[in-house]
């Protein structure tokens, strides 16, 4: 197996193809990583969540990362880490961006499931308001094994 660095174009192409990754944030030197569905448009990574620990932490420390993989088989995989700044998409200020996020995320099957299902189970019949956010990507790096 040979492992090579991916260039910026290859990293962007992987983020455009896959829809499930792991969001990393940190507060008071404590890291926190969660699975999340996302959509990448070339500049931003769009996501949906409910208010909870990750949102509270990202509000306090907006430096975050997203890690995504594409596994083709044993010894054939690619992995990208994108780092950047958390940006909350509150309406009505970001109505256009929320519309774009919905459109991009809707291309992926069950894009809302991780964000909403677990929280809704805990809330019972109380409705949980979804919240869109994005990461303004500042850098990307990736590795590919062949």
Image (spheres, grey):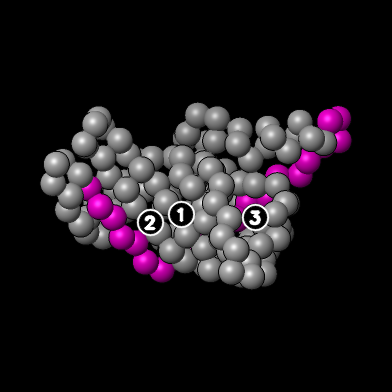
Which tag, 3 or 1, sits closer to the chain's start?
Answer: 3
Q: Residue at x 17, y 53 (%)?
A: 4
Return the residue found at the far front.
Answer: 30
Residue 24 falls left or right of residue 124 = left
Q: Nearer the viewer, residue 91 or 32?
A: 32
Q: Residue at x 70, y 47 (%)?
A: 50
Q: CA distance from mark 3 to mark 1?
A: 13 Å
Disc 2 packing (10 Å; few <14; some 14–19; many ≥20): many
**Magenta stretch holds residue 23:** no
Q: Which residue is mark 2?
A: 81
Most common SS among magenta residues: strand
Q: Which residue is mark 1?
A: 66
Residue 108 vs 79, above or below: the answer is: above
Secondary structure, mark 3, is helix
Which tag, 2 or 3, sits closer to the chain's start?
Answer: 3
Q: Which residue is mark 3?
A: 54
| Residues shaded magenta | 124-144
Residue 119: image quadrant is top right
- Residue 81 in the image, given as x and y percentages of width and height: 38, 56
Q: Quadrant of the N terminus?
A: top left
Residue 144 falls left or right of residue 89 = left
Secondary structure, mark 2, is strand
Q: Residue at x 75, y 34 (%)?
A: 120
Q: Quadrant of the C terminus?
A: top left
Residue 88: image quadrant is bottom right
Q: Verify CB contact (< 8 Å) between mark 1 and mark 2.
A: yes
Q: Nearer the viewer, residue 128 or 106?
A: 128
Q: CA distance from mark 1 to mark 2?
A: 6 Å
- Residue 71 in the image, given as x and y percentages of width and height: 30, 35
């Amino acid at each position: 197996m040979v492992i090579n660095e991916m260039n910026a174009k290859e990293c962007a192409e992987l983020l455009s193809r896959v829809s499930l990754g792991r969001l990393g944030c940190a507060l008071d030197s404590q890291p926190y990583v969660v699975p999340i569905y996302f959509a990448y448009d070339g500049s931003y990574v769009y996501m949906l969540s409910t208010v909870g620990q990750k949102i509270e932490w990202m509000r306090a420390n907006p430096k975050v990362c997203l890690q995504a993989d594409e596994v083709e088989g044993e010894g054939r995989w690619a992995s990208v880490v994108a780092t950047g700044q958390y940006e909350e998409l509150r309406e009505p200020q970001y109505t256009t961006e929320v519309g774009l996020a919905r459109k991009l995320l809707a291309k992926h099957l069950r894009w809302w499931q991780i964000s909403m299902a677990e929280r809704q189970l805990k809330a019972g019949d109380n409705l949980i308001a979804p919240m869109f956010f994005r990461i303004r990507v500042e850098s990307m790096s990736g590795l590919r094994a062949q």
